[in-house]
Amino acid sequence: MYEFSTLGWVRHVCFHPFEGFEDLRWKKKGSLKLSFIIVVMLFIAMVANDRMVGFAFNTNTVKVFNVVPLVVQSIVYFATWVIGNWCICTLLDGEGTLKKICIYSAYALVPYILCSYISVILSNFLILEEQIWVSAFSYLGLGWSVVLMISAMKAVHQYSIPKTIIAIVLTLVAMLLILFLAVLLLSLFQQVYVFIYTIYTEISYRIRG
């Protein structure tokens, strides 16, 4: 059985997607701290892809930088994925804990993150006619991470491939439900805040009057 450093395990699962996560599970390895760092790197990759893409490839017409959508697309989506997958796979007799799902999912995102950085760097040196290289790295990272994610969920829950695919689809549905409920709650809290602030303002005017 293999013995690696913390970063060595990340490299191992990335280059051996079908056995790497099984080895990771068998050896009970994986760093929660490193998984948090990977998620932060995902956020930075989102920022770089939004603000640092070469001029010829930049289709972003919004001049004002807004960090909120990027936080949602990286950190919030990742947290929702982990929670949704844990909820669904608990019902489907999955063996993965919330911690393991977080670690394995973060490790699976590494190719996507690295290829995103490479695409941003290339976009600042290539001309528009060479866009195929920028797109190639983007799709390579995405496809690689999808394969890793399927392998990660299969290993962490000890599912078969068909059951893993079903669990992932149900997790995506769960994510939509969680995000929908979160938006409803935020809207409700906003309305309550406006209502309380309106009452406070009205009382203040009457006291002063």
Image (tube, rainbow, N blue to C red):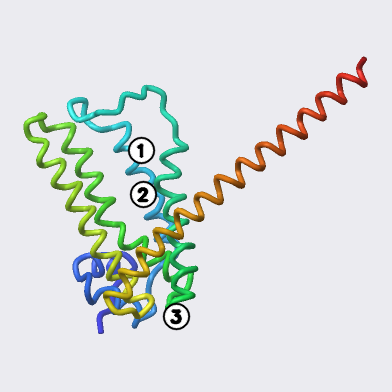
Between the C-alphas of marks 3 and 1, the distance is 37 Å
- Location of mark 3 (residue): 93
Say which of 132 and 110 sits in front: 132
Residue pictured at 32% horizontal, 31% vertical: 51
What kind of element bears circle 3? Answer: loop
Between the C-alphas of marks 2 and 3, the distance is 32 Å
Asked if the residue at tag 1 contacts the one at tag 3, i.e. Cβ–Cβ closer than 8 Å, the answer is: no
Percent position of residue 159, x then y: 33, 79
Percent position of residue 183, x then y: 55, 45
Horizontal placement of 153 versus 120: left or right?
A: right
171 is higher (above) or lower (below) than 125: below
Horizontal placement of 99 versus 28: left or right?
A: right
- Location of mark 1 (residue): 47
- Location of mark 2 (residue): 41
Amino acid at pointer 3: Asp
Graded by Cα atoms within 10 Å as few (under 14), some (14 to 19) or many (20 or more), the crowding at tag 2 reads some
- Residue at the bottom extreme, as displayed: 1
- Residue at the left extreme, as displayed: 129
Between the C-alphas of marks 2 and 1, the distance is 10 Å
- Upstream in sequence: badge 2 or badge 3: 2
What kind of element bears circle 2? Answer: helix
Amino acid at pointer 1: Val
Horizontal placement of 25 versus 71: left or right?
A: left
What kind of element bears circle 1? Answer: helix
- Upstream in sequence: badge 3 or badge 1: 1
- The residue mark sitting in front, 2 or 1, is 1
- Upstream in sequence: badge 2 or badge 1: 2
186 is higher (above) or lower (below) than 208: below
